[in-house]
Image: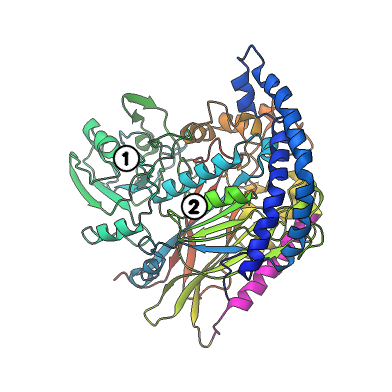
Amino acid sequence: MVLYTSPFPNSFLSVLHSFSWGLIFPCYWLADRLVGSFVPTTYEKRQRADDPCYFHALCIIITTPIYLALLVASLPFALIGFLLWSPLQSARRPYIYSRLKDKNHANGATLLTEWKAAGSGKSFCFGSANVCLLPDSLARFNNVFNTQARAKEIGRRIRNGASRPQIKIYIDSPTNTSISAASFSSLVSPQAGDNRTVNAGIKRTTSMEYKGDNCGSNNGEENREDKGGSGEPHEGEENTCIVRINGEENGHMSDTETDTVNGQARASGPAEPSLEGDAEISKTPNHKQKEGDSGSLDSCSASRESLVKVRVGDGTVDQSTVNNKLLYKASIMKKTSVRKKKHTDETFDHEISAFFPANLDFLCLQEVFDKRAAEKLKEQLHHYFEYIVYDVGVYSCHGCCSFKFVNSGLLFASRYPVMDAAYHCYPNGRGMDSLASKGALFLKVQVGSTPQDQRIVGYISCTHLQAIAGDTTVRCEQLDMLQDWLSEFRKSTSSSSTANPEELVAFDVLCGDLNFDNCSSEDKLEQQHSLFTHYKDPCRVGPGEDKPWAIGTLLDPEGLYDEDVYTPDNLQKVLESEEGRKGYLVYPTSKNHSSSQKGRKASLKGNGRRIDYMLYTEEGLYLEWKVEVEEFSFITQLAGLTDHLPVAMRLMVSTGEDDP
């Protein structure tokens, strides 16, 4: 299949389209500005609260007549442009495929060779987020604003989080369970009062202090040069610092050790720790430092609040030994409350993280509706992702039943080459959703090759369903169509047979904003849909029941700019507590609950509305391989930039072969 690198088949249509949009844009921009001036966000209201002169009201009185006059003057040109623009959409392609042009920074081909050295398996990391990049006037109804600046900052935070060094600390001794550590954001231990014994090996992943340089350069070439002189990491863990500690009997890290792990190690150079006891340290290549990980739009340093994972290992220890207090050390020593792992029977790591996972392989975004914002976002993401599919959807009356003013809002970014792509529009959208070409994007990527030169591929699908509450029937119909399209895409892009497999399928992942949760009584039909018999949800126990550690992904818009949640670190800390979640997440609806969030905290059940999904299936994969979830994360790095929590999932594809 040929991937479309331009929206039109020839340059003449592209020029004509640009000309028509140039006639429309002044009218569009003026209307957007005019409406936006009457829809303030809570952030702007607070900024203006101390203004005794009502300066903003004065500005509106002056600018509104000017905007109206210019809007009326631009209408004739916009009408001419629309008459040219609308019929051109019948020739428009359903997406644009962008590949990084700088060959020095391209590393997709290099990644394909890694599978041959992967030994017993290879992991792949997937991320998904609803980023609410609507025209500014519409975005304000979700209490977010300045779409163009947000798009750039969202892209910067995502690629900075994904390209940061990853630190992993392994504690091998059964008695070495008490650690003085700085800012372990999701450190968890057995539940208080639980007298069960647990296995003692603890695995924590953390990111060190990480200062940016804002240079925006891609890091692929530097990392490949560094790899020549460094130890080779385990497959799927590139750019990782691994610290293995074989503790003494008391198993306690000193303050010197804490400083080493959390303060002295830097992203730009090797650490020089002075650990008491037997320590083994291996360092793999680091990415160049960047900015943008903190909550502020122009912050130059990342927070030390970090990815922290706890994995139960071999050996046993009494829970009272594990449940020791930690020391929180940043610039000064502080004490922090114990983070508890309440669900030690889970087979994979799960956490609330202040960062996107290091070494993120695939990213699916929803609500990238604004074209200018999509370009800014793409530019930032290309510093990390080599392949991007954006501007997905149809316009005007082409391909769908009703007129479409905006595209689907879907965007896909990948470190691995895209082989095939297809898009389908849902024809049954209702209300405001019918004005957007919401649909599903299907992709086939190559992730490696076998020693016999068989291609190893994966399938990824991204979608955004009907949003209006109560449209249960519409969403179920869209899920039916989604399943049919998934099956058709697999069949149409498969180039192998069972007898002569030219391709081996490693994974099949479906993600997106499905606009229903697994706990609301109004969403029972969606919860019981047959899609969940074919695809597994790592956060789900069954229809109507989520796992206890799963939290909602829909934030209460009114609280987006509260100081308690305005930065990734603060939002992470708030969401780690039940009371914090009640204050800042939207909760499942039921007949017994009122529509207001306030005044009903005591009656709230569950952990919030989880409408952003990461699903995977074991059907249709290479029979001799096994796919299992390695970790699942709820991410707060986009705090203050969107009203959704991104989610990430890392899958391990086990081949069953011995390590080389």
Residue topped by disc 1: 177
Say which quadrant the C terminus sits in.
Answer: bottom left
Give percent across and percent down for residue 474. Answer: 79, 55
Q: Residue at x 24, y 52 (%)?
A: 282
Q: Does the image show residue 587?
A: no
Q: Is residue 396 above or below residue 257?
A: below
Q: Is residue 413 magenta?
A: no
Q: State whether the magenta stretch is mostly helix, strand or loop.
A: helix
**Separation of residues labelled 1 and 2 (CA atoms):** 44 Å
Q: Which label sits in the foreground, 1 or 2?
A: 2
Q: Secondary structure at mark 2?
A: helix
Q: Is residue 494 magenta?
A: yes
Give percent across and percent down for residue 301. Answer: 38, 36
Image quadrant in which you'd find residue 595: top right
Question: Which numbered disc covers residue 379?
Answer: 2
Along the viewing direction, whichever of 246 and 534 lies nearer the viewer: 534
Image quadrant in which you'd find residue 489: bottom right
Magenta part of the protein: which range? Answer: 474-498
